[in-house]
Amino acid sequence: MSQAGLVVKKAGPLALVQDAGRFGVGHLGVTQGGAADWIAFHWANWLLGNPLNSAALEIVMGGGLTLEAEDEVTLALAGADLAATLDGKPLAPNASFSLRSGQELAFKQPRQGLRAYLAFPGGLDAPEVLGSRSCTVREQLGGLQENGQPLMAGERLTWRGSSQPPRTLPENLTPLMPTSGCRLPIVLGSQVASFSGNSLYQAFNTPWQVDNRADRMGIRLTGPVLGGTLKGIVSEGIPLGAVQVPPDGQPIVLMNDRQTIGGYPRLGALTPTACATLAQCLPGTQVWLTPVSVSQAQAAYRRQFAHWISD
Amino acid sequence: MKLRIETAGMEALMVRLFDTIDVSNMAWILAADQALRDAFGEALVDLLPSYTTLLLHYDCRTLSHLDAQARVQDALTGLSPADTQQGQHHEIPVWYDESVGPDLERVAKRAGISIAELIDQHCQDDYCVFALGFAPGYGFMGLVNDTIATPRLTTPRRHVAAGSVGIADRQTAIYPLPSPGGWNVLGRTAVPLFEHAKRGEPLLRPGDSVRFRSISRADFEAQGGDTTPMEERS
């Protein structure tokens, strides 16, 4: 196909093709994957009038990623502020913008948040593997080459639709990047009772620090040492956001690319909204684990989707 | 079997049927898997069976938590165990050699037997596939004979080659992809587990049975096996 695209001049540390995730195949041992900040991802698609699940580029840190347009195109950017520029001029996050042939889009470093989402007309063109275009490096699944490889210099990004009249994000709905001291709602799980009283008090009443051992598989939190009566459990399925506590007492929040089953006791699971927040936290950010009821969490989740579906 | 329906997350229920690992659990886990798939239909996002549980991820935009719990309860009331004879039997050829099975000697020594006896032991039983997880197409199998049961490495390897066959305690498994791992590696198979999983048709499914068969280097190579030695523990 001779369709115009964007050429990757410089790849940066990590840019991945992501859609909402690979669902319905967890029983094969295949991880969920998908945009880690799914809220920003959906907004990026919404800005272009795309189907919400259209594949976009998840850009982590920025770090010099540079793309050159081969023809005129309208794109949208949402999520982290990675100091993006168009031919050297600053671009505002959470908005659409147009490129002309030969113009360069570059991402420098995180100013707020960690992951930006770049949406394309009709979604990025990449082969579907097991029902999704999401790129999972560890599983060698998805992405442009169908082998889980992150974006490489010299590759071309093409898209599946044509530019539509873009939308503007209402100011009161603009996704805010987390700041230190933010709250992460957690739904408590059945193993919570196996933790000591003191551990539970500390878990929910002391700030946790986001560790630098953090990736799309899991994010470690450091703080007080948690413990209880369970040391290990029979391996069981792991939901998104599960807060597992290995023997060293420091929790790990299991994210989109987590292993499907595992055997450490869990406090519960962060809500999907909290996972999106955590995915934008730089190492060193302070966070609080705040228990919520399932019904509160689901109500907030449905309200979030209503923004995208109501029009 | 004792059904417990627990909250595992905003849109996830842990359906707990047993407390300990046992081959006899499988008939119930498989029956529950089918019953839950039928009961939830389109509202089912993912269902992950394991040794004693099934993690059910439902679509909370169409179903409330209470409704989901009730649906699980209804689906599993009066459940009868599945016919485990329907599982497939697989014979997996393995090249057991110290170049690709760097833990052969240590595991044998620990068991107080020779490497040849260890290989015989690993090949003498039919193993049950309990669950898929960890990586696409990775089957947790067991239970290996007590004499050769060996705990995981204290420090996992950073790189375990694809096709590696290992044991951890009384479990045994094959790594479909190169990955970090802490299992004791005894040999390597050329069977392409990952390629099957990538097509959505895993070779091993829960309830299947597996027997390993020792083959020569020449046979392993003829099957397309990669003889690159495993890097020593790093």
Image (spheres, coloured by chain):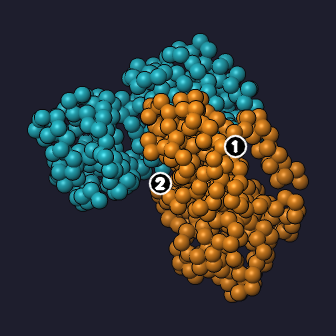
Chain colours: A orange, B cyan
| Relative vertical location of residue A17 with respect to residue B29 in this rendering, above or below | below
Amino acid at dot 1: Thr
Q: Is the residue under label 1 in contact with that under label 2 (CB below 8 Å)?
A: no
Q: Amino acid at mark 2?
A: Glu
One can see residue A271 in this view: no
Q: Please name the residue that numbered disc 2 is placed on.
A: A139
Query: Could you tell me residue A120's position as x and y percent?
Result: 72, 68
Q: Position of residue B11 (x, y in %)?
A: 68, 37
User: Which corner quadrant of the image does residue B126 belong to?
Assistant: top left
- For image coordinates 26% across by 46% down, the residue present is B185
Q: Dot 1: within a 10 Å radius of its alpha carbon, few (fewer than 14), some, or many (20 or more) residues?
A: some
The secondary structure type at the circle numbered 2 is loop
Same chain? Circles 2 and 1? yes
Residue A101, horizontal then vertical, whole percent: 72, 85
Q: Quadrant of the N terminus of chain A?
A: bottom right
Q: Is the residue A239 above or below the residue B79 in the image? A: below
Q: Return the residue at label 1.
A: A290
Asked whether residue A51 is in view, the answer is yes
Q: Quadrant of the C terminus of chain A?
A: bottom right
Task: Give x and y (percent) for residue A256.
Answer: 58, 51
* Quarter where residue B161 is shown: bottom left
Residue closest to the eye, B215 or A229: A229
The one of A68 and B4 positioned closer to us in this rendering:
B4
The residue at the point 24 percent across, 28 percent down is: B145
Disc 2/disc 1 C-alpha distance (Å) = 32 Å
View extreme (top): residue: B78
